[in-house]
Amino acid sequence: MEEKLQSQNSEKREGFFLFVWEIIKIAALALIIILPIRYFIAQPFFVKGASMESAFENGDYLIINEVSYRFSEPQRGDVVVFRFPEDPKQFFIKRIIGLPNETVEIRNNKVKIFDEKNPDGSILDESSYLDSNQITEGSLRIKIYENEYFVLGDNRLHSSDSRRWGTLNKDFIIGKTFIRAWPIKEAKYFTPVAYP
């Protein structure tokens, strides 16, 4: 009888250790798969503040695509997450308005882009993402150099952006918005902006 009890206890211990070993293997496999995705492909961010309203609200949970800019350049209209140049511990979210080798002029509530195609400038049509009551304050003209971008918040009256601290170097860009995962009713996959 004692031998039978010892055998049952031994089987229970072996079963328990096999169960624990399976959990460890599953956890290790999950880490091997998830960590590279988390650190090199996509990263989650919560929106804090009102600078990108109404496209992005305070508390939105976003997945950022960190891979695409390794193979292509940021485009006008992309919403990017980046390290704030004046304090790289902080992350900002803004929309790319001006590209390298362009000049951006803000005057009379209009954004004008000067480039090779438009040496006399072309007013940027932002009606697809700006609320109709938005005002682009400021009066400036700024040249954008290689590897630099001019970024603005969509909520122009409540945004600290390139109007205040200048152009954004590409090295500070983490990635572009890919998916809004929360709130569920606002879940969305983001596509590039089409300018007329």
Image: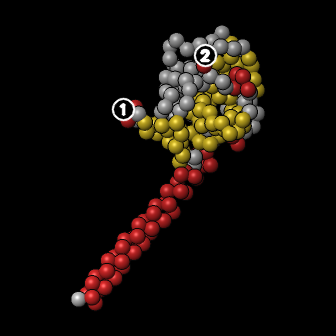
Q: Residue furthest left?
A: 1
Q: The disc labelled 2 sits on which kind of residue?
A: Leu
Q: Where is residue 70 drawn, in percent x and y?
A: 62, 49
> Is residue 171 visible in this depiction of the protein?
yes
Label 1 sits on a secondary structure element that is helix
Q: Residue furthest top?
A: 108
Q: Residue at horizontal 53%, vertical 57%?
A: 35
Label 2 sits on a secondary structure element that is helix
Q: Where is residue 155 drawn, in percent x and y?
A: 56, 20
Residue 132 drawn above or below residue 71 = above
Q: Residue at horizontal 61%, vertical 16%?
A: 157
Q: Where is residue 160 drawn, in percent x and y?
A: 66, 24
Q: CA distance from mark 2 to mark 1?
A: 27 Å
Q: The disc labelled 1 sits on which kind of residue?
A: Lys
Residue 5 image label? none
> Is residue 101 visible in this depiction of the protein?
no
Residue 126: image quadrant is top right
Q: Residue at horizontal 52%, vertical 12%?
A: 133
The residue to which callout 2 is attached is 157
Residue 94: image quadrant is top right
First in sequence: mark 2 or mark 1? 2
The residue to which callout 1 is attached is 185
Q: Taking 100 as reference, is 26 left or right?
A: left
Residue 36 drawn above or below residue 63 = below
Q: Where is residue 79 drawn, in percent x and y?
A: 56, 33
Q: Residue at horizontal 36%, vertical 32%?
A: 185
Q: Nearer the viewer, residue 117 or 183?
A: 183
Q: Nearer the viewer, residue 86 or 123?
A: 86
Question: What is the crowding at mark 1: few (fewer than 14 residues within 10 Å), some, or many (at least 20)?
Answer: few
